[in-house]
Amino acid sequence: MAPKHFALMSFYYLCAPTEPRGEASSYRRVPLSGRKNHHTVSTSVMQTQSASGRSAILLIYTGGTIGMIENRETGVLEAFDFKYLETNVPELKQFCFKVDSIQFDPPIDSAAITPMLWVRLAETIRENYRAYDGFVILHGTDTMAYTASALSFMLDNLQKPVILTGSQLPIGTLRTDGKENLITALEIAAAKQNGYARVPEVCIFFDNFLMRGNRTSKVSADQFDAFSSYNFAPLAYAGIDIRYDDALIARRGADAALSVQTEMDRNVVILKIFPGITREVVECILGIPSLKGVVLETYGSGNAPMEPWFLEALEHAVKRGLVIVNVTQCVSGYVDMHRYETGHQLETIGLISGYDSTTECAVVKLMYLFGRGYTPEKVKEEMGRSLKGEISVGEEYENNKKRC
């Protein structure tokens, strides 16, 4: 029996209408167990298909605009029951693979997302990893980039697609972008090459672009192209055909077991500098007793005010053991603390470069690393490495920019 925060439905989509609909009953529903109490869990890797030899995809609806439908009597947007998914998206009948659907009950507004939901999602994937070839997560757009970044770190040795998508208009609305996003995300999740997943990593699919999840940010509140990956080119583009850029897609590693990290340390903060920021504000934030990590959003290529009090506050925080990561406020670009004197001063007092990381990814990466119990020095070391393709350093950055 599924836990109370899930409702489980199963759909079986056929290639040809002549196949018997009763075939769906031969596929068991995969039970979901409650949250485990231990720190790390794992399962073995295997190529999975349904009994008919077709791929099987698990669709997870957490909440968000895509799962809303207008009440014809009141005009209010309400979450629709995913057992009616086939009715709302009849195009799904053309798929040649099985789709099971799990619905969070009640649905969660993406503005209310916490690391606890990331753990739920990661454990749901772990518990169903052997039974499915890929996973599609329907998620509200406001915090989708944070969730995608978190899952990219939490799901270690991932060999299967985890595609997050959503919409700007409800799926039951005229001109909705939800149908196309959902259909293509499912198609990508089921895609294989030489018998293996075509895209074995955590991604966001939105408005025809498949982007690496930990490279993506929400850039618009009201346009269909709501997400962008400015510093890393899309992994695929969906037009008449889906064109994959195999050179950018994460290489499938050895058949190691999927390992799920379930501890995320929330003692981190984002501090965005601005003209006129006061000493009291900076010292108050940096002086939080439980604070371990800071994502400092600076100007341009990593520049900040040069007032002595500001530099002293940062230096004092670093000496107390805080890890301070320098990321740019710009939507694209690279932190280079050697370019200007202001950046060099920050490096001298102990700040570390976030390179071309998004803010969303930088703060989640800090949560992940501190959650592993690492010392500040170890966290600094790992923040300077690309663990899941989240940053580019030096020549790699220049090569990526040529593709963007």
Image (spheres, rainbow, N blue to C red):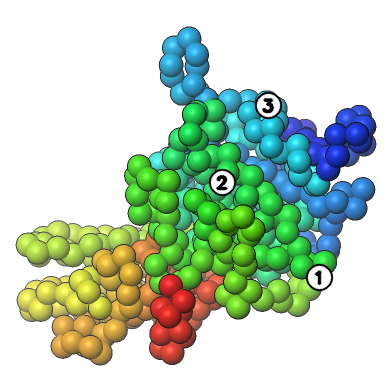
Q: Amino acid at mark 2?
A: Asn
Q: Which mark is residue 181?
A: 2
Residue at point 75%, 77% (across, down) = 254
Q: Residues within 10 Å of mark 1 (few under 14, many from 20)?
A: few
Asked if one can make out residue 316 in the rendered structure from this viewpoint, the answer is no
Camera-nearest residue between 350 and 392: 392
The residue pinned by badge 3 equals 87
The answer to which image quadrant residue 241 occupies is: bottom right
Q: Amino acid at mark 1?
A: Asn
Q: Residues within 10 Å of mark 2 (few under 14, many from 20)?
A: many
Residue at point 46%, 23% (across, down) = 77
**Is residue 20 toward the left or the right of residue 247 in the image?**
right
**On-image quarter of the C terminus:** bottom left
The answer to which image quadrant residue 326 occupies is: bottom left
Q: Secondary structure at mark 3?
A: helix
How far across and down, in percent of the image, does residue 273 sit? 18, 65
The residue pinned by badge 1 equals 194
Camera-nearest residue between 48 and 169: 169
Q: Secondary structure at mark 1?
A: loop
Q: CA distance from mark 1 to mark 2?
A: 25 Å
For the residues bearing labels 1 and 2, Cβ distance under 8 angstroms: no
How far across and down, in percent of the image, does residue 224 sit? 42, 46
